Image (tube, coloured by chain):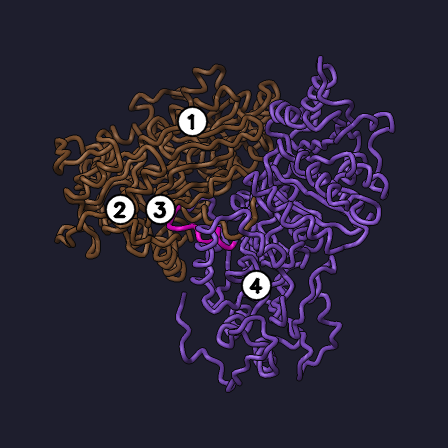
Chain colours: A purple, B brown
Amino acid sequence: MLAVTRSSLPRVPWRVCRAAYATAPSLNPVIEQDIHHFSKILPSTSVVSTLSPVASPASDLDQFNNDWMGKYKGQATTVVKPKSTHEVSQIVRHCWERRIGVVPQGGNTGLVGGSIPLKDELVLSLANMNKVRSFDPISGVLVADAGCILQSLTDYIAPHNHIMPLDLGAKGSCQIGGNVSTNAGGLRLLRYGSLHGTVLGLEVVLPDGTILDQLTTLRKDNTGYDLKQLFIGSEGTLGVITGVSILTPPAPQASNNVILALPKFDNVLPLYKLVKQQLSEILSAFEFIDRTAYELAVKHGQGRALSDEDVRGAACFVLVETSGGRREHDEEKLNHLLETLLEAEKPLINTGVLSQSPAQFSSLWALREGVTEAISKEGKAYKYDISVPLSSFQDVVDGTREHLRSKGLLNDSAVKHVIGYGHVGDGNLHLNVVAESYSPEIQAALEPYVYEVVASHRGSVSAEHGIGSMKTHALHYSKDEVSIALMKKIKEIFDPRGIMNPGKVLP
Amino acid sequence: MLAVTRSSLPRVPWRVCRAAYATAPSLNPVIEQDIHHFSKILPSTSVVSTLSPVASPASDLDQFNNDWMGKYKGQATTVVKPKSTHEVSQIVRHCWERRIGVVPQGGNTGLVGGSIPLKDELVLSLANMNKVRSFDPISGVLVADAGCILQSLTDYIAPHNHIMPLDLGAKGSCQIGGNVSTNAGGLRLLRYGSLHGTVLGLEVVLPDGTILDQLTTLRKDNTGYDLKQLFIGSEGTLGVITGVSILTPPAPQASNNVILALPKFDNVLPLYKLVKQQLSEILSAFEFIDRTAYELAVKHGQGRALSDEDVRGAACFVLVETSGGRREHDEEKLNHLLETLLEAEKPLINTGVLSQSPAQFSSLWALREGVTEAISKEGKAYKYDISVPLSSFQDVVDGTREHLRSKGLLNDSAVKHVIGYGHVGDGNLHLNVVAESYSPEIQAALEPYVYEVVASHRGSVSAEHGIGSMKTHALHYSKDEVSIALMKKIKEIFDPRGIMNPGKVLP
């Protein structure tokens, strides 16, 4: 890191201000003099603050202080929206010198409170850093500002017949910098792998304002430790990602999907094995939803894929998607798979419905993607995003249901449903407990119960959502003390003053 | 990291021994008392040493003190070959306490001196840690000791219809732990991505002997900083990798290849774009060899793919490989590609030869893979393994040739050939300068010239071979001072005593 020289210190004589409401004993709140300083660095439209001289109405801060679920609430007085890496660097350096906590915020679509201030930290929104810097149609390498919205990037490269290597429900709002900071998984991970493999380079403003320029477009570079990997999934606690270089795959020319009804969960794994063998490189999704999830999706208008008769006797469902370079080849492979499945002596499936049109294709996906929305319509959800061995998916769901029943909490006025769905191909189960309302009893019945179950399987308490502020206390269920001690040392290297997204990730 | 307790210190009263020939001012050589200690930890067959009481003949150390090219030479007196992680931990902890340098050594197939002691460090061979720990045929996750040979792992999973996500020339000798430590690239990177994406977990003995257990088999785990990434490509300077968990893809059911002759280099990129579009997900290699490389391969018996007439007028050649789930589909795609290429109004290629049998398939690959051997038969090679933008491949090769010509060094008694070949799909060029013999003049003409050219393209001075001891002085051409300073801080966290593979990677 470059040394902070005396001349780079601000000229304004800062009051030392350690108010009781600061986020940590050593962090200071934003005060008027800071606003004065930010106004020198940024145009007036880039500073939103309830403090003078800006004096925005408090409601202007709402979207930055609250998450979309209404679960987390910050008390930031000030949001800055820099337009360039240089501006980010100046802001961060100022906060470093003044020991002001900084919360980098992308699309604010996270599920674990990672982008909401714990108290009154400065919110640094990347929303105004939204330019594509370059795209090379030969190599497929895209370099973009961190604030670019995922869907915009998808649209940008579509004319070049490329797609983003990740796709998720929040694509219309989430930003690529936030995706990288949270190591977002999503629907294409099975096919294109994780961001640890597809992100080629990063530009990061370190907590002291130094710019770490590793924004390479090289696919291979074995020159020393791969520092950028540390920022992937560190949720803004080590620095502010300002630029991303990412490898985008060629767009598939054809996509198909099919929904399969299975008589019992035990058939899911043999089915997965067979599907992998037969569809091989064109398999792009293998998604599991249990019967309860299916019925909720149908109940709340997320489409109906199967007839009543087909659903009868089904314990769960699997959505299989293919993406390939030639429609007729893919269809032949998929038809062959269905024949094999239906003509087997001991069939793994009861029935299957193959989409026949783009509308049907979308409708089958709506069923799977609509589970989240259906759950939110049904009640209040306790959401656990976990990785466990594939073979344990159903045991974890059933075990949780039985556990709640044994506590007398499985009834219409407490827990209404215990639901499992998720990405079988990634070993990622979304365990959802849908209650009439949030209550301390249910919370106490679920935690640490669920985390202990996960730990007993050597699983992950956060497969793709991250730790944020929600799960810092649960980190030790997935990482041992040696790992956590090393993480703390790494935090100390990058951010010895603890200003970057304080209170997140590490306990 | 766990604290080293007093009781864990060795009982033998160690002499403080800072001989002039130690690798670094603070490191000690192995002495007889250390041998005594190792003999308590390990069976006698696991300690090779010229020191008493083992007193092996010096020749027993040769294979550990020399690399296969005969370029690097160490002076280790002692090699230990532990059989378990626990044994590795005990050895390393002892070296930590005694401040003895440790060089982890896998198959010793590297090209940059990373596994050869600089002086008289202890060599810790992983060769005896060669057990597969588990393989899950459903998920494809393989967990193996670090010392497992790549080919053995390939053979182990073949009956389950899975393949390793990496393949390289040294597969018969190189070990998976060494592959991970050096972030090996190889021939399958285009298809399956880098080890940063496919390695799921690692078990590492840290420099103080603590075991870092991150040997998860989870595909997704967003719980804190992804520490294992730091060990991928750190060449044994942060700890000893003892176990690897890796995702293996399903084996393709069919593979085909074709060699294409191009009239000029400028056609390579449009060809690559077209091939990517048409072959999409079944494209598994796109390898480039220039005319000189082709002719050398043919001259030294690496097969002949094309007739004299076909070769006439060819500036370079491209080997395209497909791997897919169904032979007839793949052949149809490949044939369609060849038709498109040959019937184009302005053809990108002169001609193409499609392999028609497994023997022909191997023969085309032998041509590409035989370039290395042909070069070693032709003379002494200066090998540069660089990443530069695809469009600059030929310019870098031609520019180097002209540079040597301008220095009067391009003639039969100095530099005979300047050759370019490599992985177009990965942006990875192997620039080889073949000389009659190694000479200071040629060395001085090539370095820093080549590194400066690479830096001017924002390229990598080591795409896949690593830094080792060969390129520590050149690291700054690819990484700026901010990055190098952070790397040094990370080294300091893990290895404050500097015992792990001293003198490698960092200048």
How many angstroms separate mark 2 from mark 1 (CA)?
31 Å
The answer to if B444 sits in the magenta stretch is no
In this rendering, the label closer to the viewer, 2 or 3: 2
Of the pair A98 and A390, the residue shown nearer to us: A390
Residue wearing tag 1: B153
- Host chain of mark 3: B
Residues at discs 2 and 3 both on one chain: yes
Circle 2 packing at 10 Å, graded few (<14), some (14-19), many (20+), is many
Marks 1/4 in contact by CB < 8 Å: the verdict is no
Element under disc 1: helix
Which of the labelled discs sits on residue B239, or is there none?
Answer: 3
Which portion, as a residue range, is magenta? A222-231
Residue wearing tag 4: A503
Q: Where is residue B132 in the image (x, y as percent from the top left)?
A: 42, 28
Judge left or right: residue A375 versus residue B344.
right
Element under disc 2: helix
In this rendering, the label closer to the viewer, 4 or 2: 2
Q: Tell me the amino acid under the disc marked 2.
A: His
